[in-house]
Image (cartoon, rainbow, N blue to C red):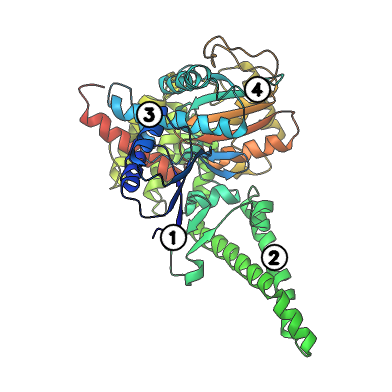
């Protein structure tokens, strides 16, 4: 097909370079235009040039897009091997190196796309955050310092690399705002929702797109509470019915012409209405089936309020409740364990036993594995607001003020971290700098990268703080986008690998 020109867009991996070499040694097309999503090494360019004996390659370019922008302030690297962040380095050094390399590549591409070179800090308690921070600094300040040498800004941006294990609570909670809830109950992959897993739908509705860039209703409602969404959808349906009514009233040729002109808009509106009605209807069914309002109230209490005796009783009652699903029982015991691991070991054992007897699918030791990997001793930051007296006071004030919605009272640890950055109070002891690049004053741009994955609850916090005009723009990124299912799956996979290497760990 030598009359065709071929455009390739590739990640610059050694596998892709090999594929490309094979193609070029026996070219199928007249011209090859090669675009890579990240930095090419000199050796890779030489290899490609050596294979291009027939000189079919017209151009080679780097387009820094080695990440997926989910929303305006939220990106992910979609790493399938996300569970490696949980494992100690000795368990599988080569795969851990791949994991770190991919994270560093992705972070590098984000900053090349933003045309910035940041000051780098990381979570003190996390080996993997430290390692990724150091390797990123090496890339930006040594190996490719020329490429990252952008026009100096008065304040360098900040890259803060933290570990999912600093806040294992957020990915375990049920969600009650629209985008986060869809991901928790149905699942979102690259802004697409696959509905085939939950029922039979017409062909055009089996996979729907949920993107704030393309869908005005979603953009306006993605962070709203589930209760308000129902009202807003009803309003949208009413508007649509008005339009549909006017379309039925076709009497003249002019009416017909007008209808044909407006038809694409009408079709789009129809598709959008049915999409959101379908999603909310399905989620309502799941909430009812799994008694999630009951479950979630206890989850929020475990995440936000003290009171171990009441918590133990509430969790025990839910473990005994036939309507509560296995995954919800497991999450409740995990949330209890994270909160009271030090205070009530006896009751914790009782809950473990009850969980094992109630849930056939329960893998013994998973909660203990979570505590070992993300317990109080392993975390940086004040997850429950009970270490630091400022946080204790803030929690008391919140308790007195009352909460407007019991289901969304939890705030992720990330929110506190961002508030500390805004106030210039992020402690050097907890979040050390890499190398001798320090920051005086407040940065104007901050990229927070969570090794182990982000949640939509956290991206909502970022969007809200960005809207509050604090003078700082936050961007959130991570190795994956989690819901509780994915978080637990990563935990199980890591536990499996740790078990088979039990002699090492």
Q: Do the residues labelled 2 and 1 touch (CB within 8 Å)?
A: no
Q: Which of marks 3 and 4 is in front?
A: 3
Which numbered marker is on residue 43?
3
Q: Under tag 1, what secondary structure?
A: loop
Residue carrying label 2: 236
- Residue 78 spot, x, y in % from top left: 45, 41
Foreground mark, 2 or 1, reads: 1
Quadrant location, the N terminus: bottom left
* Mark 2 / mark 4, whichever is N-terminal: 2
Near mark 1 (Cα within 10 A), the count class, few <14, some 14-19 or many ≥20, is few
Mark 3 in CB contact with mark 1 (< 8 angstroms): no
Q: Which of 217 and 229 is in front in this view?
A: 217
Is 225 drawn above or below residue 449 in the view shown? below
**Which quarter of the picture shows residue 96?**
top left
Q: Which of 454 and 442 is in front in this view?
A: 442
Callouts 4 and 1 close, C-beta under 8 Å? no
Q: Is residue 188 above or below residue 112?
A: below
Q: Which of marks 3 and 4 is nearer the N terminus?
A: 3
Report helix, strand or loop for mark 4: helix
Residue 363 in the image: state x and y as whole percent.
28, 40
**Where 21 sits versus 444, above or below?**
below
Question: Real-space Cα distance between discs 3 and 4?
Answer: 41 Å
Q: Which disc number belongs to residue 3? A: 1
CA distance separating discs 3 and 1: 30 Å
The residue positioned 57% from the left and 29% from the top of the image is: 448
Q: Nearer the viewer, mark 4 or mark 1?
A: 1
Can residue 304 be seen here? The reply is: no
Q: How far apart are marks 2 and 4 (CA)?
A: 39 Å
Q: Which residue is drawn at 68% across and 22% down?
A: 443
Image disc number at residue 421: 4
């Amino acid at each position: 097909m030598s009359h065709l020109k071929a455009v390739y867009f590739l990640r610059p991996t050694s596998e892709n370079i090999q594929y490309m070499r094979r193609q070029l040694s026996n070219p199928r097309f007249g011209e090859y235009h090669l675009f890579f999503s990240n930095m090419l090494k000199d050796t890779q360019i030489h290899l490609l040039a050596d294979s291009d004996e027939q000189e079919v390659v017209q151009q080679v370019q780097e387009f820094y897009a080695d990440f997926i922008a989910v929303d305006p302030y939220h990106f992910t690297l979609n790493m399938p091997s996300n569970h490696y962040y949980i494992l100690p380095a000795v368990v599988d050094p080569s795969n851990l190196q791949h994991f770190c390399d991919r994270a560093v590549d992705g972070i590098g591409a984000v900053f090349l796309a933003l045309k910035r070179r940041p000051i780098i800090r990381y979570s003190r308690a996390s080996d993997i955050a430290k390692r990724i921070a150091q390797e990123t600094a090496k890339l930006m300040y040594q190996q490719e310092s020329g490429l990252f040498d952008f026009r100096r800004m008065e304040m360098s941006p900040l890259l803060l690399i933290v570990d999912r294990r600093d806040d294992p609570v957020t990915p375990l909670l049920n969600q009650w705002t629209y985008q986060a809830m869809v991901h928790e109950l149905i699942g979102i992959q690259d802004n697409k929702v696959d509905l085939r897993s939950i029922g039979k739908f017409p062909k055009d509705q089996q996979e729907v797109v949920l993107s704030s860039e393309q869908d005005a209703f979603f953009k306006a409602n993605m962070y709203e509470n589930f209760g308000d969404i129902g009202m807003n959808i009803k309003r949208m349906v009413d508007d649509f019915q008005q339009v549909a009514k006017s379309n039925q009233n076709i009497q003249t040729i002019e009416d017909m012409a007008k209808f044909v002109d407006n038809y694409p808009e009408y079709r789009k509106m129809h598709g959008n209405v049915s999409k959101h009605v379908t999603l909310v209807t399905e989620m309502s069914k799941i909430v009812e089936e799994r008694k999630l309002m009951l479950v979630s109230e206890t989850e929020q209490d475990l995440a936000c309020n003290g009171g171990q005796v009441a918590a133990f009783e509430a969790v025990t009652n839910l473990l005994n409740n036939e309507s509560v699903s296995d995954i919800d029982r497991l999450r409740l015991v995990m949330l209890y364990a994270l909160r009271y691991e030090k205070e009530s070991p006896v009751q914790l054992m009782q809950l473990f036993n009850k969980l094992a007897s109630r849930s056939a699918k329960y893998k013994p030791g998973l909660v203990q594995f979570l505590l070992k990997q993300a317990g109080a001793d392993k975390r940086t930051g004040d997850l429950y607001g009970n270490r630091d007296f400022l946080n204790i006071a803030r929690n008391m004030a919140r308790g007195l003020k009352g909460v407007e919605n019991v289901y969304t009272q939890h705030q992720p640890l990330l929110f506190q971290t961002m508030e500390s950055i805004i106030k210039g109070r992020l402690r050097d002891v907890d979040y050390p700098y890499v190398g001798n690049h320090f920051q005086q004053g407040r940065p104007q741009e901050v990229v927070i990268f969570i090794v182990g994955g982000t949640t939509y609850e956290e991206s909502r916090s970022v969007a809200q703080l960005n809207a509050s005009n604090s003078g700082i723009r936050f961007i959130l990124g991570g190795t994956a986008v989690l819901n509780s299912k994915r978080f637990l799956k990563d935990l199980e996979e890591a536990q499996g690998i740790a078990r088979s290497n039990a002699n090492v760990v």
